[in-house]
Amino acid sequence: MEAEVGPQACLRVANVKSLLTVLQSVKPSNSKQECVITMGLEDGMRLQLEDESKTLQSHISLRPDLFTLVESPEGRQQFGLQWALLVDTLAVFASLGGAELELRYPGPNHELVFEMVEEADSTVCTYARIATTDTQVPTPLTDYWREPSSSFIISGVMLKEAVDDLEWAATGGAATQRGTCQLRLGRHPRSLVLRASGAGSLEVDFPTDEDDNVHGFACTADEVMASYKHKHLKAAFCSIPHHVKDYLGEISTKVSIDPQGLMKVTHMIGMRPGAPAHSSRPPGTQGAGFGNAVVTFVLLPEEDEDDA
């Protein structure tokens, strides 16, 4: 028997395809990976994942103004959910058309509830529920962040292509190979180099002129250098969408490295609004339905063999 449903946190999404595309920028290595979801008036929706190795964390921040309705009468709600189930369920609703999607928590048995009402006929409703868990919130790696940090803003496409090009040198094409990539920043002369070592050796030297590809370059020492697992760089750079103008707006990528080698990759992804809504539901706290989603990856550095 289902329990009686009390006050629920509720988020309404105008453009489900846009939301789905942002979430697909995070691809956990484990298909059963769980995430922690936070819903609230101040949070909108936040999603956090931690790799099994605990050396890579992913975070998606969807501010309240990205939703057309935000309600949370009981304050902030937090729960765990299997990531693949969330993405697969959103994919089903994204394929149905342009109607708004409502997300509610908790459901009758503490599920996350999905509901879409067809605008042309409010009697047609698509409904789903996903079981949630009490997954513990991971300690943010950014708690260990130190300043001053070096940073640069770059075209995400350039980074994706570079990491893809370095895959063979780093891993030899074997998914089990523990290949690493070294990121090196120089101040005088200004330089930005990504080098792979493992099955082979290969370097990609990025242009650092203040152009459309790399800008905001800041190096806090004569040379800043740190190494990272290739698979973690691939997770951080290679799944960000770049050619979905119907669903997303501009995408900006900032890479920051602290003095310990901790790397923070921040993608600002513009979410486009959906079609004008004609929902029969009562109005609530209204948002614009569009703005910037923030996707962040935090990577722990590998220990360089030279320093071991």
Image: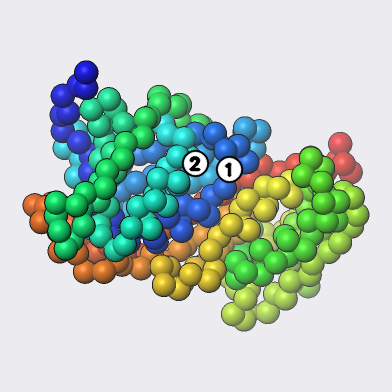
Quadrant containing the C terminus in the rendered view: top right
Q: Residue 207 location, x and y as percent?
A: 72, 76
Residue drawn at 45 percent across, 63 percent down: 269
In the rendered image, which residue does mark 1 sit on?
28
In the rendered image, the vertical position of residue 78 relative to residue 165, given as above or below: above
Numbered disc 1: secondary structure: loop
* Amino acid at dot 1: Pro
From the viewer's perspective, is 162 left or right of 99? Answer: right
Q: Quadrant of residue 167?
A: bottom right
- Locate the N terminus and report the quarter of the image it occupies: top left
- Which residue is found at the position 35% from the left and 68% from the top? 272
Vertical placement of residue 57 versus 98, above or below: above
Which one is closest to the eye, mark 1 or mark 2? 2
What residue sits right under mark 2 in the picture?
84
Query: Is label 1 in contact with label 2 (beta carbons under 8 Å)?
Result: yes
Q: How many marks?
A: 2
Q: Mark 1 to mark 2: distance in Å?
A: 9 Å
Q: Quadrant of residue 8?
A: top left
Other-residue count near label 2 (Cα within 10 Å), few / some / many at <14 / 14–19 / ≥20: some
